Every structure is written in structure tokens, then in C-alpha cells.
Image (cartoon, grey):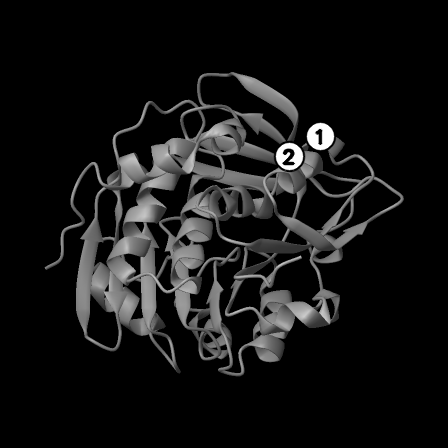
Amino acid sequence: MSPLDLVLIGNLLVDDLVFEDGTTRMAQPGGALLHAALAAAAWGTRAGCVTIAGSDYPRAALDDLRGRGVALDGLTTLRTPGARVWLLYEDGGRRMLHRAGRPSHAEVSPEPTAVPASWLRAPAVHVAPMPLPRQRALTDALGDGTRLVSVDPCEPITDGSLDAWRAVLARVDVVFASREELRLSGADEHPEAALRALAVGRVRYVLHKRGAAGGVLFDAREGTLTPWSARPAREVDPTGAGDAFAGAFMGALAVGCRVDEALARGAATASVAVEAEGSLALLYVTRAELEARATGGPIRTD
């Protein structure tokens, strides 16, 4: 196959969703990599997944990834059921609870040695949400400055965990953090100070994802803040929207797009992702449709 533009490292999980209105959807194919990979591939980015799937992970979802051109050479398939999680939506946020009797989050999170050797030549790597020790192992191994590396936290960044997080952040170029993940004191009232606190080592961009409220990007090199607006969308299911944003954004940087173009791609892709259940919208959207959504409104730069 052609050389990859973007390597995605993270989880494929089976999701049981409970929404605030009492609606449930059980045994859904999920995991950050499903949404991030489909998002990147929808823009024509050559993406590959390094991940672990249980024997119960829906085969159709893996076929969908392959059908979109996503390389799965880095997939390890267990002989037993994999991790399964409850996703509980309430009070405008989301909680993830791992189901008892299943492999732990760490057990289904790939190690650095799982990355195919030929993929190490890819210009960009995205480390999706996983336990902090595994994310540190991956950034230690891959964040040597020869490629663009991004990280999306799973464990919250708090005043107490900031020092541990800085050891990871020092080895990456791009940081994504949602409102649930960025919990430094005063982050809601003074987000710029919180974003600056994450800009250590060679970090260039820190992105604060705020769902339907859009978000803000801090450029540590330029010292500037760039807010972005969420694109208009008919929200059906917010699951995976943040991962879709990250996949589209990193895919854009991997192929040489400017950061404003990457933001437009990320916002457009996230808005499409929420318009159908699970990953269905990302599976069927065309690049032309995404480009139309991306140009539907300006990205404001202060």
C-alpha cells in the first residue's frame, strides 16, 4: 500500500450508551480510533490504526474501516471479548465506566512495539485517549522530533496531575483537551492561562474542545488564540465528535495544510459526525460534502 500520512494509536471498544432522555443503544462499535480514522479517511488522508479489538468487536465496523481505505496492519485481535464501556450522558457532559468482567483499559491499549516498523516513516502520529502511563510510553517512544505527534487525554488534567502530564506533553506537538479533560483551576473562567500551562517542551498547538460551543486553539509559538465556531448541525449522537475533530485536524496537518485549514476541517467533520448514530455519518459522507461544510463559515482569528 501507499505510505501512510497518519498513524492513529488507541482503542476500539464496544459501547453501551445511555442518553439523558433515557434512550439507550447497546453493543455499539466504538472507540476513539473508529471515529478518528473514518474522519481522516473521509478527507483522503492515508491513515492506519494501531489497536486491539476483542473477539466481540463488530466485524462490520472493521470492514467499514478497510472499505474507507484505513490500514489495519496494526490491529491485534483477541480470542476473547474485549473492553466494553458504559457511556452515560448527563448534565451536558459524559462519563465513561468500564464494564466489570472485561479486560481493563490498559489491557486493550497498544504498546509502542505494536506500531509496524514501516509506519514509523509516517509524518504524523495521533495518540488517542488511553491510560496516562500508556500514553507516556507511546510519546516517549515516538516523540523524538522526527514526526508530528498529538495526544488526546483520557485522564483529566488537574492541578494535582499537571506535573505528570507535562512529562507527556514535553514530547508532543499538539494537545487536544475537552472541557471534561481540562480541569485546571480557573480553566472555565480563564482558558488562556490553562492552555498556556500545557504548552511545555515543543508543544505548538493546544486545542480546547468545547463541543457545540466550538473551541479555542492556542499557538504557543505565536502566542495567539484562535477561537473556532462549531458548524451548524442537527445533533443526533455526540459520541465520537471530538475524536473525529482530532482525526481530521491531524490528517490535515500531516498533508501540509495550514492550521486554519485544519481547524475548518476538524469543525466541519465533527459537525457531520453528530448527525447520525455512531459512526454512520462519517462512513457515508463524501469529501465534497465535507469541503462544503468546511467553507460554510469563517474561522475567526483574534
Q: Is residue 41 above or below residue 149?
A: above
Q: Residue 208 vs residue 145: left or right?
A: left
Tell me what residue is drawn at x 59 percent, y 79 percent: 140
**Element assignment for label 1:** helix
> Where does residue 194 sit, x and y in percent of width and height?
28, 65
Q: Is residue 180 above or below residue 5?
A: above
The quarter of the rendered structure image containing the N terminus is bottom right
**Element assignment for label 2:** helix
Tell me what residue is drawn at x 51 percent, y 39 percent: 95
To which residue does mark 1 refer? 60
> Where does residue 294 sit, x and y in percent of width and height?
28, 41
> Where does residue 126 sit, x and y in percent of width and height?
52, 61
* Mark 2 neighbour class, 10 Å CA radius: few under 14, some 14 to 19, many 20 or more: some
Residue located farthest toward the left when viewing the structure as drawn: 302
Residue in the foreground of this view, choosing between 194 and 159 = 194
Tell me what residue is drawn at x 65 percent, y 23 percent: 26
Q: Residue 132 vs residue 218: left or right?
A: right
**Badge number at residue 267:** none
Residue in the foreground of this view, choosing between 74 and 93 = 74
The quarter of the rendered structure image containing the C terminus is bottom left
To which residue does mark 2 refer? 64
* Quadrant in the rendering for residue 249: bottom left
* Mark 1 neighbour class, 10 Å CA radius: few under 14, some 14 to 19, many 20 or more: few
* Quadrant in the rendering for residue 117: bottom right
Q: Is residue 176 above or below residue 212?
A: below
Residue in the foreground of this view, choosing between 35 and 111 = 35
Amino acid at dot 2: Asp
